Image: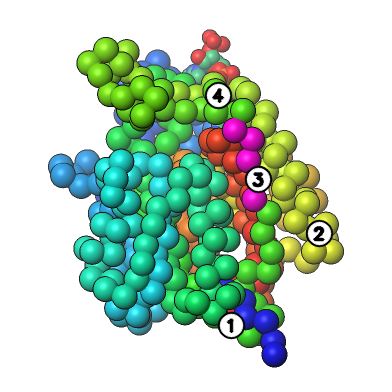
Amino acid sequence: MSKIRAAITGVGGYVPDYILTNEELSTMVDTTDEWIMSRIGIKERRILKEEGKGTSDLAVRAIENLLEKTGTKAEEIDLLICATITPDYQFPATANIITDKLGMKNAFSFDLNVACSGFIFALSTASKYIETGSNKKVIVVGAEKMSSIIDYTDRNTCAIFGDGAGAVLLEPTTEELGIMDSILENDGAGRKHLHKKAGGSLKPASHENIDAREHFVYQEGQPVFKFAVTKMADVSVEIMEKNNLTADDISWLVPHQANLRIINATANRMGLKDKSKVMINIQKYGNTTAATIPLCLLDYEKQIKKGDTLILAAFGAGFSWGSIYLKWAY
Ligand code: UT7
């Protein structure tokens, strides 16, 4: 009997309308378009401004787009995994809210918190449910309202992040297509360089810690950058070597969009000379954390061909990092 693999059979996405440009940011903090473009590579990012809307609303719109494109009914979905670090509430899971809003009556659902590596960890997890035969139509959504945890008086972080959601549908296939391999890794000692100080069980929200702005993202850029450059490249090369792939075999690198310099370093280490094989949309969306990779897949969907070899790679808080090798199925 041939092996069952999990194939991506559709991609959907949504970004809010409001565009926060570098020009507008430079009226809020001491920064310039030149600094942001040369150090990070971001021109603008999207912000969810609508009152009373959270991450689940971004995810719902991305999934509606996915269901419509693939001609799938909400009741057909049997599992939904939401990768996010900006859940609507600390509990219940945002995934539970999404399935309720969309009428996914036959799906169980849960959230997965692995920050910028969240989509890769969620996709790898979802693939196991398909490979074992226990699930047939699974949605993985990466969704973030990063603007809800960003301090727009802190120039070290506010230029980087944006809001958005991207989703994929996974279905079983017995062809030599779909998710072929994944590598997932963590080093929790890295948490000191990138975290949100207050609002969890360790330091519950208080007037004092809110006044101290500890309910926002805290990042020490340089140590995170050093780890990100090394680990994202290492794990991408490792998955190539493990599967006997050379740079010529790779149709697309789909990197997490944190910094154009990290993306270029990863592509170089993999030996990808043709930079048009590297999916990049950081300039228009910034770092949407768990949503960057599916939003890239959506932007490049028309150019990807059945059988194409893709390497997905990410690095994020935790620290966490990982890669996925997959063959495009449509
Ligand atoms: O996706 C999750 C994982 N996160 C990452 O992968 C992020 C990794 N880190 C980075 O991408 C970069 O470290 C940053 C983009 C965050 C920062 O770039 P950098 O080149 O490492 O700058 P830096 O932190 O070393 O700061 C250099 C200077 C500092 O000024 P002083 O102390 O030299 O006077 C910063 O205050 O640049 C200053 N700076 C800015 N200046 C203008 C920091 N942010 C800004 C800004 N505009 N937005």
Using the image, tell me which numbered label, if any, was put on residue 139: none
Q: Residues within 10 Å of mark 4 (few under 14, many from 20)?
A: some
Amino acid at pointer 4: His
Q: Earlier in the sequence, mark 4 or mark 2?
A: 4
Image quadrant in which you'd find residue 68: bottom left
Local secondary structure at mark 4: helix
Task: Find residue 154 and report its horizontal and vertical position in percent.
Answer: 39, 19
The three-letter amino acid code for the residue at tag 1 is: Thr
Which disc number belongs to residue 193?
Answer: 4
The three-letter code of the residue at mark 3 reads Glu
The answer to whether one can see residue 282 in this image is no
135 with respect to 1 (left or right) = left
Residue 296 at x, y percent in the picture: 51, 56
Name the secondary structure under disc 3.
strand
Quote the CA–CA distance across marks 4 and 2. Answer: 30 Å
- Give above or below for 164 relative to 38: below
Q: Secondary structure at mark 1?
A: strand
Q: Is residue 70 left or right of residue 181?
A: left
Residue positioned 83% across, 57% down in the render: 241
Q: Nearer the viewer, residue 152 or 193?
A: 193
Could you say which is closer to the camera, residue 275 or residue 151? 151
| Comes first in the chain, label 2 or label 3 | 3
> Which residue bears the numbered disc 2?
242
Given residues 167 and 330, the one toward you in this image is 167
Secondary structure state at the residue bearing disc 2? helix
Please state if 72 lies on the left or on the right of 324 as rendered.
left
Q: Earlier in the sequence, mark 1 or mark 3?
A: 1
User: Which numbered tag is attached to residue 173?
Assistant: 1
Separation of disc 3 and disc 4 at Cα? Answer: 17 Å
